[in-house]
Image (spheres, rainbow, N blue to C red):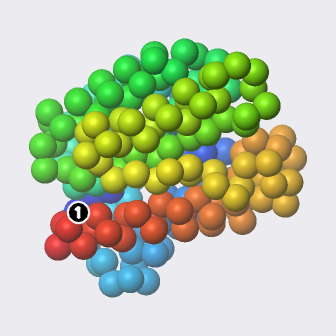
Protein backbone atom coordinates (compact mmCIF):
# COMPACT_ATOMS: atom_id res chain seq x y z
CA UNK A 1 0.00 0.00 0.00
CA UNK A 2 1.36 3.41 -0.97
CA UNK A 3 0.17 6.66 0.63
CA UNK A 4 -0.22 10.07 -0.97
CA UNK A 5 -0.67 12.87 1.57
CA UNK A 6 -2.17 16.14 0.34
CA UNK A 7 -1.14 18.82 2.83
CA UNK A 8 -2.84 22.12 2.17
CA UNK A 9 -5.51 24.70 2.91
CA UNK A 10 -9.14 25.25 1.82
CA UNK A 11 -8.22 24.54 -1.81
CA UNK A 12 -7.14 21.04 -0.77
CA UNK A 13 -9.93 20.60 1.79
CA UNK A 14 -12.50 21.44 -0.90
CA UNK A 15 -14.06 24.35 0.97
CA UNK A 16 -17.82 24.55 0.43
CA UNK A 17 -17.98 21.17 -1.32
CA UNK A 18 -18.36 17.54 -0.31
CA UNK A 19 -15.05 15.79 0.39
CA UNK A 20 -15.66 13.64 -2.71
CA UNK A 21 -15.51 16.82 -4.85
CA UNK A 22 -12.15 18.00 -3.46
CA UNK A 23 -9.25 17.44 -5.82
CA UNK A 24 -7.44 14.88 -3.62
CA UNK A 25 -10.54 12.64 -3.89
CA UNK A 26 -10.54 13.19 -7.65
CA UNK A 27 -6.88 12.12 -7.70
CA UNK A 28 -7.88 8.92 -5.85
CA UNK A 29 -10.34 8.22 -8.69
CA UNK A 30 -7.67 8.94 -11.33
CA UNK A 31 -5.31 6.50 -9.59
CA UNK A 32 -7.90 3.73 -9.87
CA UNK A 33 -8.67 4.60 -13.51
CA UNK A 34 -4.94 4.51 -14.34
CA UNK A 35 -4.47 1.12 -12.69
CA UNK A 36 -2.66 2.27 -9.55
CA UNK A 37 -4.51 -0.09 -7.24
CA UNK A 38 -2.60 -0.05 -3.97
CA UNK A 39 -2.66 3.71 -3.47
CA UNK A 40 -4.43 5.63 -0.73
CA UNK A 41 -4.96 9.38 -0.80
CA UNK A 42 -5.18 11.28 2.49
CA UNK A 43 -6.61 14.79 2.44
CA UNK A 44 -4.88 16.83 5.15
CA UNK A 45 -6.26 20.15 3.97
CA UNK A 46 -7.53 22.65 6.55
CA UNK A 47 -9.36 25.81 5.53
CA UNK A 48 -7.56 28.98 6.54
CA UNK A 49 -4.19 27.30 6.95
CA UNK A 50 -1.12 29.44 6.37
CA UNK A 51 2.39 28.09 5.91
CA UNK A 52 3.04 28.93 9.58
CA UNK A 53 0.06 26.91 10.83
CA UNK A 54 0.99 24.13 8.40
CA UNK A 55 4.50 24.05 9.85
CA UNK A 56 2.95 23.82 13.31
CA UNK A 57 0.73 20.84 12.42
CA UNK A 58 2.85 18.87 9.93
CA UNK A 59 4.61 16.66 12.51
CA UNK A 60 1.47 14.76 13.47
CA UNK A 61 1.02 13.68 9.83
CA UNK A 62 4.60 12.45 9.49
CA UNK A 63 4.30 9.55 11.94
CA UNK A 64 2.54 7.38 9.34
CA UNK A 65 4.20 6.11 6.14
CA UNK A 66 4.15 8.56 3.22
CA UNK A 67 5.25 7.78 -0.33
CA UNK A 68 4.18 11.07 -1.94
CA UNK A 69 3.77 14.34 -0.05
CA UNK A 70 1.87 17.05 -1.96
CA UNK A 71 2.55 20.44 -0.37
CA UNK A 72 -0.15 22.93 -1.36
CA UNK A 73 0.11 25.81 1.09
CA UNK A 74 0.69 29.51 0.57
CA UNK A 75 -2.56 30.90 -0.82
CA UNK A 76 -3.59 32.32 2.56
CA UNK A 77 -0.12 33.80 3.08
CA UNK A 78 -0.54 35.66 -0.20
CA UNK A 79 -4.03 36.85 0.67
CA UNK A 80 -2.78 38.15 4.02
CA UNK A 81 0.33 39.77 2.58
CA UNK A 82 2.72 37.70 4.70
CA UNK A 83 6.28 38.50 3.56
CA UNK A 84 7.41 36.15 0.77
CA UNK A 85 10.60 35.38 2.70
CA UNK A 86 8.58 34.14 5.69
CA UNK A 87 6.36 31.99 3.45
CA UNK A 88 9.45 30.54 1.80
CA UNK A 89 11.12 29.75 5.14
CA UNK A 90 7.99 28.01 6.45
CA UNK A 91 7.63 25.90 3.29
CA UNK A 92 11.34 25.03 3.44
CA UNK A 93 10.99 23.86 7.04
CA UNK A 94 8.00 21.68 6.09
CA UNK A 95 10.00 20.16 3.20
CA UNK A 96 12.96 19.59 5.56
CA UNK A 97 10.74 17.80 8.09
CA UNK A 98 9.25 15.55 5.39
CA UNK A 99 12.70 14.71 3.99
CA UNK A 100 14.06 14.00 7.47
CA UNK A 101 11.20 11.72 8.52
CA UNK A 102 10.59 10.14 5.07
CA UNK A 103 13.82 10.39 3.07
CA UNK A 104 12.43 8.22 0.25
CA UNK A 105 9.14 10.11 -0.11
CA UNK A 106 8.55 12.03 -3.31
CA UNK A 107 7.52 15.64 -2.74
CA UNK A 108 5.36 17.72 -5.04
CA UNK A 109 5.18 21.46 -4.42
CA UNK A 110 2.08 23.24 -5.72
CA UNK A 111 2.81 26.82 -6.69
CA UNK A 112 0.57 29.75 -5.87
CA UNK A 113 0.26 33.18 -7.39
CA UNK A 114 -1.48 36.35 -6.42
CA UNK A 115 -2.84 38.85 -8.94
CA UNK A 116 -0.44 41.36 -10.40
CA UNK A 117 -2.88 44.09 -9.33
CA UNK A 118 -1.26 43.88 -5.89
CA UNK A 119 1.00 46.94 -5.72
CA UNK A 120 4.78 46.76 -5.54
CA UNK A 121 7.02 43.73 -6.04
CA UNK A 122 5.07 41.40 -3.77
CA UNK A 123 3.20 39.48 -6.51
CA UNK A 124 6.42 38.77 -8.41
CA UNK A 125 8.35 37.79 -5.25
CA UNK A 126 5.50 35.55 -4.13
CA UNK A 127 5.27 33.77 -7.50
CA UNK A 128 9.06 33.30 -7.65
CA UNK A 129 9.44 31.75 -4.19
CA UNK A 130 7.66 28.52 -5.18
CA UNK A 131 9.78 27.95 -8.28
CA UNK A 132 12.97 28.67 -6.31
CA UNK A 133 11.98 26.22 -3.57
CA UNK A 134 11.20 23.50 -6.13
CA UNK A 135 14.59 23.94 -7.80
CA UNK A 136 16.53 24.24 -4.54
CA UNK A 137 14.95 21.06 -3.14
CA UNK A 138 14.80 19.15 -6.43
CA UNK A 139 11.09 18.40 -5.98
CA UNK A 140 8.32 18.01 -8.55
CA UNK A 141 6.47 21.25 -9.18
CA UNK A 142 2.95 22.27 -10.17
CA UNK A 143 3.64 25.82 -11.43
CA UNK A 144 0.25 27.31 -10.45
CA UNK A 145 -2.40 25.13 -8.83
CA UNK A 146 -5.19 27.59 -9.75
CA UNK A 147 -4.10 28.01 -13.38
CA UNK A 148 -7.20 28.77 -15.47
CA UNK A 149 -9.39 28.73 -12.33
CA UNK A 150 -8.42 31.90 -10.45
CA UNK A 151 -10.66 34.78 -11.45
CA UNK A 152 -12.98 32.59 -13.53
CA UNK A 153 -16.51 33.08 -12.15
CA UNK A 154 -17.90 29.85 -13.61
CA UNK A 155 -15.17 27.77 -11.90
CA UNK A 156 -15.49 29.28 -8.43
CA UNK A 157 -18.03 29.41 -5.64
CA UNK A 158 -19.98 32.67 -5.24
CA UNK A 159 -17.18 34.00 -2.98
CA UNK A 160 -14.99 34.18 -6.12
CA UNK A 161 -12.05 32.64 -4.25
CA UNK A 162 -12.73 28.94 -3.75
CA UNK A 163 -13.04 26.55 -6.71
CA UNK A 164 -16.41 24.91 -7.27
CA UNK A 165 -16.69 21.25 -8.32
CA UNK A 166 -15.66 22.08 -11.90
CA UNK A 167 -12.74 24.18 -10.64
CA UNK A 168 -11.60 21.32 -8.42
CA UNK A 169 -11.47 19.09 -11.51
CA UNK A 170 -8.95 21.53 -13.00
CA UNK A 171 -6.85 21.45 -9.80
CA UNK A 172 -6.87 17.65 -10.07
CA UNK A 173 -5.80 17.86 -13.74
CA UNK A 174 -2.87 20.19 -12.96
CA UNK A 175 -1.74 17.97 -10.09
CA UNK A 176 -2.19 14.72 -12.03
CA UNK A 177 -0.03 16.06 -14.88
CA UNK A 178 2.91 16.19 -12.44
CA UNK A 179 1.91 13.30 -10.16
CA UNK A 180 1.77 10.80 -13.01
CA UNK A 181 5.49 11.26 -13.70
CA UNK A 182 6.29 10.97 -9.98
CA UNK A 183 4.33 7.70 -9.73
CA UNK A 184 6.33 6.19 -12.59
CA UNK A 185 9.48 6.81 -10.53
CA UNK A 186 7.94 4.97 -7.56
CA UNK A 187 7.12 1.78 -9.47
> Which quadrant holds residue 160?
top right
The residue pinned by badge 1 equals 2
> Residue at 45% of width from left, 16% of height from top?
86
Say which of 38 and 160 sits in front.
Answer: 160
Up/down of 155 relative to 10, above or below: below
Is residue 60 visible to us here?
no
In which quadrant of the rendered image does the N terminus lie?
Answer: bottom left
Q: Residue at x 79, y 48 (%)?
A: 151
Q: In this picture, is 155 found above or below 157?
A: below
Q: Position of residue 68 (x, y in %)?
A: 28, 54
Q: Secondary structure at mark 1?
A: strand
- How packed is label 1: few (under 14 Cα within 10 Å), some, or many (20 or more)? some
Quadrant including the C terminus: bottom left
| Residue at the image point whose x is 32% and y is 28% from the top | 92
Of residues 138 and 24, the one drawn nearer to the viewer in this rendering: 138
Residue at position x 55%, y 67% in the image? 173
Image-based side of 172 in relation to 168, left or right: left
- Measured from the top left, where is residue 172 in percent x and y? 54, 63
Residue 21, horizontal then vertical, whole percent: 62, 61
Give whichever of 101, 88 is nearer the camera. Answer: 88
Q: Is residue 88 left or right of residue 92?
A: right
Residue 105 in sight from this viewpoint: yes
Q: Find residue 8 and report its horizontal and vertical position in percent.
A: 48, 40
Q: Nearer the viewer, residue 120 or 34?
A: 120
Q: Number of labelled discs?
A: 1
- Horizontal side, residue 149 vs residue 109: left or right: right
* Among the 4 quarters of the image, the one containing residue 162: top right
Amino acid sequence: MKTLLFFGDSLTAGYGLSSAQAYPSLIQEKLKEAGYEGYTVINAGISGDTTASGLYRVDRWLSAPIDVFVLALGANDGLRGIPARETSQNLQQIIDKVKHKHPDAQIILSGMEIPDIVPGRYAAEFRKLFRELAIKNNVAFVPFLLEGVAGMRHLNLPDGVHPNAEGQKMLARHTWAILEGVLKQLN
